[in-house]
Image: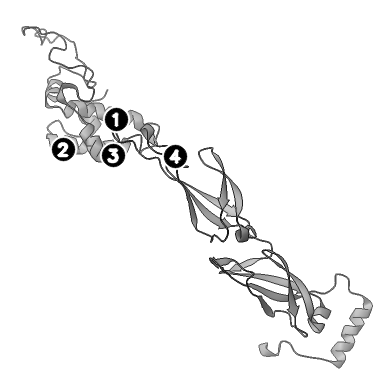
């Protein structure tokens, strides 16, 4: 055991108040329930033993006279002038010394300090509540409509299947009581906080509670109009394409977006994209040349 004065970082002449302040600061910094460094437990034991000596007036005096060492044990050596205990009735190594220096020995008790620092959780007092754990649940966008179950692998090695309720907004948290870290000394377990994140979708994009999707249509559908199928979060639906619909036009399909209240849904915003056939025939190209010659038009006139 090192010098208790050095362990607490105080001078030999430090008054009791300064010794107590130094101990409080170090105890809070190195207590194993708050410091996860593997060496914290050893450091905490060292400063606790140091304070059991320096925080007790009698034991501090014994240490200063060389009667006990930094572990609180009798030194048991002979001075040049003889045994320092010799000549006192019933004296001997350890006379007047309560060995072991456990809390409460010789009227000295540090539990009041631990109670102040850690809410009375030490040495048989009120157990400490475990820490809350956090994780992220990534939810498929289509599953937001009806809710879904997700499998979570937690940092503590636990696996949980969790129900994600329908309509939950991205960024919201779900709290599961008692699924966090266990509490030290039999305390109640902390909670698990699950942050909901929407998984990216290949063609649906979010715009608040509205959902946007690009819909490819053929040239003849754009010219002639008609009913076309469009994907939604809850399955396929039909939308009416007006004749002469230009590419880039956006149509609204109401109630096909994300929930944003108990009984209200956002909309699906469908943007028309013109798609040519994968294989263009010479006849089709000739029709386009005739169309260009006979019916020219300027779709980019507003950019000139």
Residue linked to disc 4? 181
Judged left or right of residue 195, residue 271 is right
Q: Which mark is residue 118?
A: 3
Residue linked to disc 1? 124
Q: How many marks?
A: 4
Measured along the vertical axis of the image, is residue 84 above or below residue 304?
A: above
Q: Nearer the viewer, mark 1 or mark 3?
A: 1
| C-alpha span from label 2 to label 3 | 20 Å
Q: Nearer the viewer, mark 2 or mark 1?
A: 1
Q: Residue at x 32, y 35 (%)?
A: 31
Q: What x and y, as percent, mark residue 201?
A: 66, 61
Q: Residue at x 70, y 71 (%)?
A: 214
Measured along the vertical axis of the image, is residue 216 above or below residue 176?
A: below
Where on the picture, by quarter, is residue 298?
A: bottom right
Q: Is the residue marked by circle 3 packed among few (<14), some (14-19), or many (20+) residues within 10 Å?
A: some
Quick one: SS at disc 1?
A: loop
- Viewer-side residue, 234 vs 272: 234
| C-alpha span from label 4 to label 3 | 18 Å
Quick one: SS at disc 3?
A: helix
- Viewer-side residue, 231 vs 263: 263
Where on the picture, by quarter, is residue 139?
A: bottom right
């Amino acid at each position: 055991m090192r010098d208790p004065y050095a362990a607490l970082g105080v001078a030999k002449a430090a008054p009791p108040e300064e010794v107590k302040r130094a101990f409080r600061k170090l105890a809070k910094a190195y207590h194993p329930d708050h410091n996860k460094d593997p060496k914290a437990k050893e450091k905490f034991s060292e400063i606790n033993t140091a304070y059991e000596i320096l925080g007790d007036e009698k034991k501090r005096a014994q240490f200063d006279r060389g009667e006990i060492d930094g572990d609180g044990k009798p030194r048991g050596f002979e001075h040049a002038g003889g045994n320092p205990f010799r000549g006192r009735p019933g004296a001997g190594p350890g006379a007047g010394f309560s060995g072991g220096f456990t809390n409460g020995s010789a009227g000295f008790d540090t539990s009041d300090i631990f109670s102040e620092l850690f809410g009375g959780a030490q040495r048989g007092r009120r157990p400490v509540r475990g820490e809350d754990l956090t994780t992220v649940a990534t939810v498929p966008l289509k599953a937001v409509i009806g809710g879904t179950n997700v499998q979570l692998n937690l940092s503590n090695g636990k696996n949980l299947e969790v129900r994600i309720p329908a309509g939950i907004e991205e960024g919201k948290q779900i709290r599961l009581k008692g699924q966090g870290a266990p509490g030290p000394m039999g305390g109640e377990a902390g909670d698990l906080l699950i942050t909901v994140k929407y998984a990216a979708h290949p063609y649906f994009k979010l715009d608040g509670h509205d959902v946007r999707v690009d819909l490819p249509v053929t040239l003849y559908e754009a010219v002639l109009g008609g009913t076309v199928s469009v994907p939604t979060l809850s399955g396929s639906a039909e939308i009416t394409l007006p004749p002469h619909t230009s590419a880039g036009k956006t149509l609204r399909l109401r109630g096909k977006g994300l929930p944003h209240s108990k009984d209200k849904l956002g909309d699906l915003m469908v943007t028309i994209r013109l798609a040519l056939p994968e294989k263009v025939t010479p006849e089709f190209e000739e029709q386009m040349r005739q169309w260009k010659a006979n019916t020219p038009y300027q779709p980019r006139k507003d950019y000139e």
